[in-house]
Image: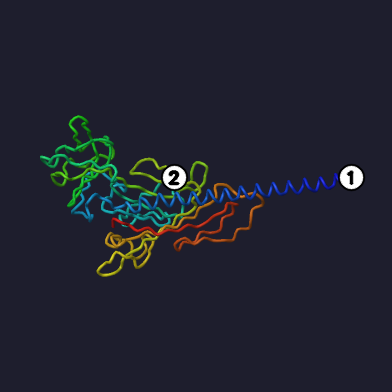
């Protein structure tokens, strides 16, 4: 009888230890996946923030240097390399466009980044005979009808949609009246010559939306295409922008403001943005076991306070400040 009792005690102790060890392992695994998701989310955002405003060798973007031939809405407003949306309030700054990302989670921020891709460039091979002529390039590899591209030299740039690709003669067409969104004109701003380059142009929007399982997640949308889910379990994104207020400017931010806040509304004010401070609130991919805790904690991301959550997910805030290299 004593032996049986001792055996039962040992069995119970081993079972308790096993259950506790498994629970700890699962919790550590959830925490590790949460941190990995946060790292990937910040990597995506950081890479594109550093690339935004890259327009080939063109140093400064303004209405005199960039001609947009595309029939465009929000996604091709090329004069603004970066735009911000604060708390899904309905207005992008500085363009004042009111087109919201589809199903954006309330009270979350979004950001639009515009850039040419340095890995997709081909070089103009001979001077254009006139501004509406096809463009002779040294290669058409990676280019397709419908692509939005930027034709850029070190003095100016044109953005247009490719309407024809001649693989034998290596010519790119840019007619009007076809394609989506299509070109509003066939005329470019000038006759381009070597060594001008043609680069794919992208407007990339980052925002928070619930995925098909109802979990808030980080989504990315390129141009006017379908949004894709990047990272699951991103509850909140809050962004502030580092503005250089010195006269003359020294490219060092003196103050951080939210999009649309006084001092960060007009194109002139946004031209002083030098950095972006990202705040993410990321949850574990699944709830912790056991009874739900009485959650009372709140979360402060870049000045925005997120209320306590009622589920049993663990959460953590992640912050990073990114320098905008091309602004």
User: Dividing the picture into quarters, in which one does residue 293 lie?
Assistant: bottom right
Q: Which residue is mark 1?
A: 1
In the image, farthest residue toward the top: 168
Q: Residue at x 77, y 47 (%)?
A: 12
**What is the total number of numbered labels drawn onto the structure image?**
2
| 85 with respect to 61 (left or right) | right
Which part of the image, by quadrant, shows the C terminus? bottom left
Q: Determine crowd level at label 1: few under 14, some 14-19, many 20+ residues with C-alpha closer than 10 A.
A: few
Q: Residue furthest right?
A: 1
Q: Nearer the viewer, residue 36 or 297?
A: 36
Q: Residue furthest bottom?
A: 247
Q: Position of residue 188 (x, y in %)?
A: 17, 44
User: Please, what secondary structure does the residue beneath circle 1 have?
Assistant: loop
- Please rate how many residues cluster around mark 2, counting C-alpha atoms within 10 Å: few if below 14, some from 14 to 19, many from 20: some
> Which residue is labeled 2 in the image?
230
**Please, is residue 296 above or below residue 76 in the view?**
below
Front-lying residue, 293 or 169: 169
Judge depth for marks 2 and 1 and give the one in front. 1
Residue 54 screen position, x and y as percent: 28, 51
Q: Answer left or right for 213 relative to 187.
A: right
Q: Quadrant of the N terminus?
A: top right
Ranked by sequence position, the earlier of labels 2 and 1 is 1
Name the residue rendered at 57%, 49% in the picture. Answer: 30
**Residue 65, x across and y down, in percent:** 19, 53
**Of helix, strand and loop, which one carries label 2?**
strand
Question: Residue 165: image x %, image y %?
Answer: 22, 33
Q: Closest to the observer: 311 or 200?
A: 200
């Amino acid at each position: 009888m004593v032996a049986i009792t001792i055996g039962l005690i040992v069995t119970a102790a081993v079972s308790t230890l096993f259950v506790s060890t498994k629970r700890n392992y699962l919790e550590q695994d959830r925490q590790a996946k949460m941190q990995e998701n946060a790292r990937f989310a910040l990597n995506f955002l950081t890479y594109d923030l550093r690339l935004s405003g890259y327009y080939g060798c063109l140093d400064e973007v303004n209405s005199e240097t960039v001609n947009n031939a595309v029939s465009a809405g929000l996604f091709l407003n090329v004069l603004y390399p970066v735009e911000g949306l604060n708390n899904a309030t309905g207005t992008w700054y500085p363009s004042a466009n009111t087109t919201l990302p589809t199903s954006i989670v309330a009270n979350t921020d979004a950001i639009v980044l515009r850039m040419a891709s340095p890995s997709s460039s081909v070089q103009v091979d001979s001077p254009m005979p006139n501004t509406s002529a096809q463009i002779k390039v040294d290669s058409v590899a990676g280019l397709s009808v419908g692509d939005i591209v930027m034709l850029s030299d070190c003095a100016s740039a044109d953005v247009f949609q490719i309407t024809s690709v001649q693989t034998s003669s290596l010519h790119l067409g840019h007619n009007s009246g076809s394609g989506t969104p299509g070109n509003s004109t066939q005329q470019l701003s000038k006759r381009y010559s070597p060594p001008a380059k043609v680069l794919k142009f992208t407007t990339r929007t980052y925002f928070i939306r619930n995925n098909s399982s109802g979990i808030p997640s980080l989504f990315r949308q390129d141009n006017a295409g379908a949004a894709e889910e990047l990272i699951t379990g991103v509850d909140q994104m809050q962004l502030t922008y580092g503005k250089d207020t010195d006269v003359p400017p020294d490219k060092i931010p003196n103050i951080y403001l939210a999009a649309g806040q006084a001092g960060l509304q007009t194109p002139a004010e946004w031209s002083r943005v030098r950095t972006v401070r990202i705040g993410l609130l990321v949850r574990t991919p699944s709830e912790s076991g056991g009874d739900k805790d009485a959650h009372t904690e709140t979360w402060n991301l870049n000045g925005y306070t997120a209320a306590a959550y009622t589920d049993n997910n663990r959460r953590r805030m992640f912050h990073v400040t990114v320098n905008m290299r091309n602004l």
